[in-house]
Structure formats: C-alpha cells, structure tokens
Amino acid sequence: MKSISRRSFIRGAGGAILALPWMESISLAASRPAPAQRMAFFYVPIGVVRRGFFPGESQADIPIGNSPPIKDISWVGNQVGFQPIQWTNTLQPLEKLQEKVTLITGMDRTFQIGTDVHAQCASCFLSSAEPFSITQSAWPLDRTLDQMVGDHVGKTTPFRTLELSCNSHKDNLESIYFDNISWYGTGHVAPSIRDPRKLYRRLFATQEIQRFRNITDLVLEDARSLRLELGYYDKQKFSEYLDSVRTIETQMDRLEEMKGELKNVTIAEPAAAYLPRGEYIRLMGDLMVVALQTGLTNVATLMIGPERWNTPFMFEGLFDKPVSYHKMSHNQPVYVDQLMQVDRFYMEQFAYVLEKMDSIRESDGSTLLDNTLLTYGSGLGDGSTHQYNDLPIVVAGKAQGKLNTGAHLHCPDGTPLANLWLTQAQAMGLKIDKFADSTGTLKPLIS
C-alpha cells in the first residue's frame, strides 16, 4: 500500500495536478487524519426584502426607496434567544438542512457618516471596525475576518485564503470598495477571481489548457493505477470525485461557448448580462467546495454580486431578460414580488452549496458541512431603506460541534455584527477577546 496523504496529488502529462479528497484506503499509516476545520462566506449584495426573509414580517409595510433608514422594525413579539425557525418564503430552500443551519437576527453594524452606504456595507462587512477608528480610509475598513482566520488555519494549505466573485461584468461602474469583501488591510484589497476557467487553472495548476481540455484525461493513467489499490467504497468515492471535476469542466465549456455566441449578437446590455446567474454561481460554488474538500484552502469567500451596480444580470427561470436588482430595490412597492423572487433565487444557490458540502464524507464519518462555518449574509438589512440594523444572517455547518445549530437566534437590539465574528474566530481557534467593535461573544450560539 502506498503511503500518501489526503492532500497528495496525482500528476499527469502536460503539467496537470489533481488534488485528492480524503480516502481511507490511502491515508497515512493506519490512523485517520482529523478533518480540518474550514470557514467560508456567501455574501449577497443590497440586502433583502424584509417581508420575504424575516419571520413575522410578512405583513410589514413595504418601504419606499430612498426613505430614511428604519430605526426599529424588529419582529413584534420576538423573544431574545433561541426559538424554532419559521420557514419564510426566502428561507424555505434551507428547510431540508434545518438541523445544520442557524438563522441569526438582531445583528447591527454602525454606519460611518460621510461615506457611501453601499461601498461601506460591502467592504466593511467582514471587518466591522469602529467608526472613525481607521484614519487612513474614508471607510471603517480593517483587516477582514477571513484573512485573520487564514493566518491561523492556512499555514499548511496551498492557498491561505481563496477569494471568489460572481461579477462577470468588466464595465467597472464602481470602485473596488463596492466589489470586494476580503481585505488584507486598510486600502489593500484581496483581489477576487471571477473567471471560472482562471480559478480552475489556479486550483489545479493546469498547463496547455487549450490543447488538453479535460484535466481528468491527463491524469487518467495514474488514476487507474491508484484505483487498483482502493477499497470498494473509495473506488465509488474516487469515481464520484472525478465525475464532479468533469462536470465542472463541462459547465465551464458551456458558459465559454455562450460568451462567444453573445459577442456576435447586437444587444443593448453587455454580453455578460445574459449569462445565466444560477449556473454561474453554482459553478463558482462547486469550485469553492472542491478547494475546501481537497485541502487546497481552509478559508474562502464568495461574493455573489457587486453592490449598487446598475448593470443588469440574467436570473434564469425568473425573468425573460436581464434586470437590475439595485434599480428595482429603490422602488420596492412596485417590484416587491420580483425582488423577493431574486432573494429566494440567491437562497436556492446557497442551499445548493450546502447540500453538496453535506454529501461529502470526511475521515471520521462527518461531512464537509459539519466541519465548516459557512455564513450567508449581507451588509444591509433592507436594500430599499439602506438600513444597517437587523442584518440577514444565516450560519450553516456545525463547526465540528462547537456551535449550536438548527434554530433561530434572535439577539438583543443593538448587538454588533462583530460579536458573531468574534464568536466564529474563537471557534476557529483564534485566541482573541475582541474583534473590531465587538462587545462580547454570542454565548447562546456556543455549544
């Protein structure tokens, strides 16, 4: 039996390198390595429609765009602490994984007056610095949580952190502050990868990609020899993994073919506007999951779209042409139904990623999701009113049993979002007592 670890590689002709998931047949010696703990973020821009997302608000007034932020629209009768999750229209796609998700409400961020609301809510989402505490920037922007955790858990992975984005447009309508949530520090963005092919090549170090379109073909000879040494279960798992990689390649080829066709058509919007959003998001999600599964990284961020950009996107299955969520958000009374459809559409993509992670078994019998802290969230509580209070937050994954899951945690009014980040940082092993403007941890969340 060869002694190769879970993070070993199969190398084929042409410079292709394929990272392997954990398989018991090829683990080092007789002991099973403990699964690594991972952290990931799924950021949704421009907030949500509250009446579709938050329990108890289905009959709330529909706000008029550009109105002053609502100071207190918390759920009437909602008691502080844990309670069962009420599966609203937007949250319903998560119900199948209800034991592994936690809805968290009542979390606020403090807005620093004098800077753009959208730029601040995106760029500062994972840093939550106290207002006016950062003198080198117009935004309260500091080193983000993912980068701090990456310093701690990314020392042995090929990529300390991985930053992804689903913004395919190249029109650069806004500055980098509207289009990035991960930052090395004030003024130093961690640039995200937006092209699935570039991300694929970066993860798997593929060379001569135009000559060799299918990475699995390059390593098939080595894979066959390895497969002979695997047990029955691992043979099945190995086949599933290679099939997953092939599927990713097929999806990339399809989107690239579509891009080429759109360039030859005269259309009002940029060609990228017509790329199907769900397929694009799921493809980037698949690549993120593979990177976490194989130990290429333990920390990743996935920004689903940019803040405030009016460039339209094609939400397949919802509308017959590309639409601008930001423009619609400022006229919520007219577009409330369409906006809630988009909110649910994004939640369906999040649920897709969760279900995929929960199907991947690790060395101790747990799943990849069990060993991951995956947070869905937005820097605005409501895109129409630009409110910074009561943000929409869902935490998925059990963090290896460190956090309670399967319920709705409603926090006391005014609880800083940084309290969640401090709680997560400690769960990931950081020895810190404060993060940004935190006032403590979310003690009910801690198992």
Image (cartoon, rainbow, N blue to C red):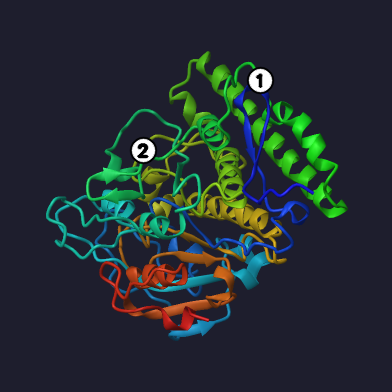
Is the residue 112 above or below the residue 206 in the image? below
Element on which disc 1 rests: loop
Q: Quadrant of residue 357?
A: bottom right
User: Residue 212, which numbered label?
Assistant: 1
Residue type, label 2: Asn
State whether residue 85 appears in this view: no
Residue 289 located left or right of residue 176: right
Residue 291, position as x, y percentages in the image: 57, 46
Is the residue 154 above or below the residue 265 in the image? below
Q: Quadrant of residue 308?
A: top left
Nearest the eye: 124 or 143: 143
Of all residues, the one furthest to the left in this rendering is 135
Element on which disc 2 rests: loop
Nearest the eye: 384 or 440: 440
User: Residue 447, which numbered label?
Assistant: none
Residue 368 located left or right of residue 302: right
Q: CA distance from mark 1 to mark 2?
A: 38 Å
Identified at 76% across, 31% down, the residue is 220
State whether residue 192 appears in this view: yes
Is the residue 14 above or below the residue 401 in the image? above
The residue where tag 2 is placed is: 310
Circle 1 Cα neighbour tier, 10 Å, few/some/many (<14 / 14–19 / ≥20):
some
Identified at 59% across, 64% down, the residue is 371
Residue 62, position as x, y percentages in the image: 40, 62
- Marks 1 and 2 in Cβ contact (< 8 Å): no
